[in-house]
Image (spheres, rainbow, N blue to C red):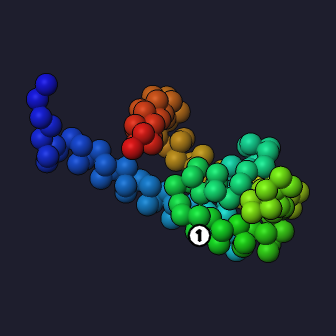
Amino acid sequence: MSVPDQNDPLAVALFSEVFMADQLARNRISRALPKGMELSHFSVLNHLAHLNDERSPAQLADTFHVTRGAMTNTLAKLEWAGHVHIRPDWDDARRKFVSISPAGRAARDAAVAAITPVIGDVVRAIGPEKVRAVLPILRDIRLRLGES
């Protein structure tokens, strides 16, 4: 097996495109979100809505690959807005559990409604066939990066 080239132009081009697409997508989606909602807030609400179950702040921090402090800050803002409920763990008072509130679910649904036209336009412009073709590749990249 050969040693990979440290300056592999294919790898550099791939990650340049991924980084730029990420930056542009975050910018567009952030602008489309309802007033006062940040992308981090939407991400947590969307995750909790899909799970339909409680998670600890530490579990959420691990899921989003952020520090516990960053997640605590996001959760405090979501709790202040009434979008999440944070309760103590009845078995271990040092731990807490987070769940989405009805208001949080409504805020998440409003955010989805606001960003759907933005992401839908991109999919239509590229073409659903191309998007379906690239999804497995992006998923493989995500899984490979998540291993480290």
Residue at 64% from the left image edge and 51% from the top image edge:
59
Which quarter shows the N terminus?
A: top left
Is 44 on the left or on the right of 20, as rendered? Answer: right
Residue toward you, 16 or 85: 85
Is 3 on the left or on the right of 142, as rendered? Answer: left
Residue at 72% from the left image edge and 73% from the top image edge:
77
Residue at 23% from the left image edge and 48% from the top image edge:
12
Q: Find disc 1 in the rendering and name its residue.
A: 69
Establish if 101 lies above or below 131: below
Establish if 47 lies above or below 143: below
Q: Amino acid at mark 1?
A: Gly
Q: Quadrant of residue 2?
A: top left
Residue at 75% from the left image edge and 68% from the top image edge:
78
Q: Could you tell me residue 18's position as x and y percent?
A: 37, 49
Which quarter shows the C terminus?
A: top left
Residue toward you, 98 or 124: 98
Q: Quadrant of residue 4?
A: top left
| Any part of residue 134 in sight | no
| Any part of residue 1 in sight | yes
Residue found at the very far top of the displayed protein:
1
Task: Give SS at disc 1.
Answer: helix
The number of numbered discs placed on residues in the rendered structure image is: 1
Is 135 on the left or on the right of 44, as rendered? Answer: left
Residue toward you, 98 or 52: 98
Q: Residues within 10 Å of mark 1 (few under 14, many from 20)?
A: few
Q: Quadrant of residue 82?
A: bottom right
